[in-house]
Image: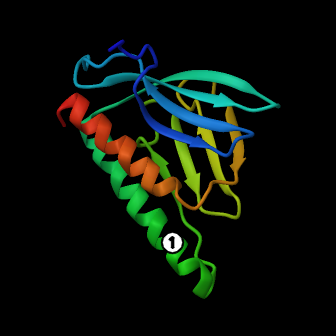
Amino acid sequence: MAESTEPLALIVLDDGLQSVAVRLVSLMPQEGYYDAEIVIRSDFVNATVRTGFDAADISEWGSLLDVVEEADAEAGEDEAEFSGDWPREGRTAYLTFITEDPYVIEVHDAPGTQISVRIPLDLKSDWIGEARERLDTVRRTLGV
């Protein structure tokens, strides 16, 4: 069986027209951090920015999925909206996930260029399940 040449992706948010992904550049942490890249694809902008995260950030992505799922469940009742950053703001490029309709992902290269890009995504209803499967795959692969 041939090995995949695709980088291991922790996050893939794709509505068929545009996408935001976080892919590992290396499976070995350097000084506790995994080297990764945030990749944006759309008709308007295609960009890649380096980022990094640690084992705690991987768990925080799982927690962010929990909160988003809860906000989605409550959205019918009182139009609950939520936004959360991943990984923690300030030390590297990061995402802000906003539960609007459609979802919005902001990509911030805060410590570098200070450029931010806002990407609306009309994600399918099963995206959280797919995100959890991807998270489990990354956890198993990295042993975290």
Q: Is residue 70 left or right of residue 79?
A: left
**Furthest-bottom residue in view?**
77
Q: Quick check: can you spot residue 93? A: no
Work out which quarter of the rendered image holds the N terminus and state it: top left
Q: Given the current orientation, which residue lies at the most extreme front position?
A: 1
92 or 59, which lies in front? 59
Report helix, strand or loop for mark 1: helix
Return the x and y of residue 66 as percentages of the image width and height: 39, 63
Determine which residue is flagged by label 1: 71
The three-letter amino acid code for the residue at tag 1 is: Ala
Residue 23 versus residue 11 in the image, above or below: above
Name the spot of residue 86 as percent of width and height, x first: 45, 44
Quadrant housing residue 101: bottom right
**Quadrant occupied by the C terminus:** top left
Quarter assignment of residue 119:
top right
Q: Residue at x 25, y 20 (%)?
A: 29
